[in-house]
Image: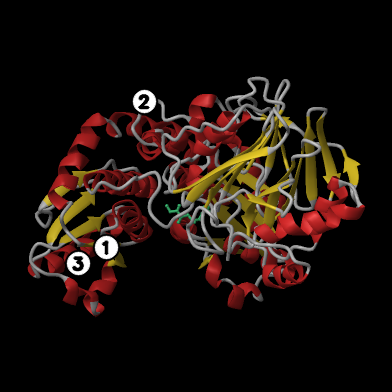
Amino acid sequence: MCGIFAIVNDKTHRAAQTTLEGLKKLEYRGYDSWGVAVVTEKGASVAIEKHVGKIGGATTGLPNGTIAIGHTRWATHGGVTDQNAHPHLDCTGRFVVIHNGIVENYQELKQNLIKKHHVFHSETDTEVIAHSIEDAVKNKPTVQAVLEVFSQLAGSNAIVVLDAKTKTIVACRNGSPLVAGIGDESFFLASDVPAFLRYTSTVHFLSDGEAVVLSNQGIKLFDIRTIKTKPMSTQTLDWKLEDAEKGGYPHFMIKEIMEQVRTVPKTAQVNNDVISAVAKQIQKGNRVVLTACGTASYCALAAKYFFADIGLEVQSYGAYEFAPFAKFSDKKTVLFAISQSGETADTLIATKKAKQNGAYIVAVVNARGSTLERLSDAVIPVGAGPEIAVVSTKAFTSQLSTLYLVSQAVTGTLPKAASEITTLGRVLETWLTDTLCEKIIKLAKDLVDHTDMYVIGKHTGYPAGLEFALKIKETSYIHAEPFAAGELKHGVITLIQKGTPCFVIATQENSKLELLSSAAELKARGGKIIGVAPFPSAEFDVHVPIPDAGPLTIIPAVIVGQLLGYYLGIGRGTDPDKPRNLAKSVTVK
Ligand code: F6R
């Protein structure tokens, strides 16, 4: 939630404009409002511009400067107003603050500051940070003041503080993501690498308890507790600028859907060693537990079927409901935490609980340098590249194929599974094309005015259905409800009326007949049956053929849901890259 960007030593002297462009790459993290602050070259004062709403194609007339910070907000404390938009200032206007997270003890801090006659201009928790620094700096240097104030903040937070007087930026991390970019002459900070990828791919991912200080003199890393410098661990990522651009597509979502012809087969090449090591942990007889949120939790559920099919009973939990079950994790547990971002608060909390109990933690992540990676004993990076659209697409299918590889590695058939995924990649190349898109566009046009849809599936078709329905809901705001096919007759069937769109997701040969019986029950009540299946059937009013990829048929089935969600969203005039009320990375509980 919320995107942070900062630059020092901008040789173009257009630091505000550079910051605004960086923020545009972070808008997926929040789009309630945005703001930029720059230290002006004349007079070294601070100029700020803030607006409610999405950045879109915004430009800024802020004056020249070489040091600036900016923020794109997903509101938590205080409504969506210009006053509550970041950056926030102290009473003197010297300290300018942007923030990602929640200062859980802000009320207490605010009351103390009000007693000391500080004047607040917003309802945010963030503003207490600026006023606290103003107080602290009276008897100590800026860096020490900022680090000490940060240590007093409860909750998961990342802050960036611009000191206009010394032209220094101090940034601290505890629980919310922050990455420093090291360019030839300029230095950057951001919540995520794509924001500054145009300038550099050499980065240091801050760990919790670390701070960086940026000035024209360079960049220094600090330990927040000891206030001492420490060596940076920089790495150069293999991400390309194109990964963070739309590349001719109208939206990141459709670009990322189409990229799956490349990202799915890539999973068969990149992680064999770590997958084999993790499989060994499972072969020791350890209990396997999977946890995740949202789309990633449907991957956990699908993996449960992958493991069941090799004869292993595993548990999967939505991370937000893990607490009562955490006590069952122990030294003989292998916990898979699945996450695109590696920063989802609920997933991190569940992982920490299992880790405290001694579980072996495996992170199945897409973004790099995340908190989840750091908590883990083994990391399987699924390698889908930056996923910029708020709704998850390519990361999900890479997670699915990765978990399939893990399940097969347990039975010693990893090379065979890898070759199945490579074959699927070739099949996707001929199937996931403009022709398929045209078919789905036509279907979307037929369905766009419906208010309710239902999705049923069996075996891996069930998690596929959950994800299929989620894509429709998130992107088009149409009510789409998924069910296990067998659940239908236990109540849900009352909802089916003449013409109600009912998607039937078939991913598995063995359950085909049962699934088609459920389809027939829907049809008998007037449902319009749309079969997403490798085979035709008399029960289908519309058939969207998908390739039969054996146990991996869930992947093309979900891709149909992604495309349909996208084109329904387009038909309804939504912004598929930034659905209302959502943020890409849910770093709050
Ligand atoms: C749906 C979506 C969310 C995320 C969920 C977990 O399209 O993007 O449901 O899947 O918030 O996020 P990660 O995978 O980053 O932990």
Q: How many marks?
A: 3
Please name the amino acid that badge 1 sits on: His
Q: Nearer the viewer, mark 2 or mark 3?
A: 2
Residue at mark 1 to residue at mark 2: CA–CA distance = 31 Å
Residue at mark 2 to residue at mark 3: CA–CA distance = 42 Å
Q: What residue sits 63% from the left and 73% below the top?
A: 326
Within 8 Å of ligand 1, the CB of disc 1? no
* Residue 106 visible in image: yes
Q: What residue sits 79% from the left and 63% below the top?
A: 152
Disc 1 marks which residue? 479
Please name the amino acid that badge 3 sits on: Ser
* Residue 269 visible in image: no
Sequence-earlier tag: 2 or 3:
2
Residue at mark 3 to residue at mark 1: CA–CA distance = 21 Å
For mark 3, give the secondary structure. helix
Instruction: Determine whether, in the image, residue 62 is placed left or right of residue 58.
Output: right
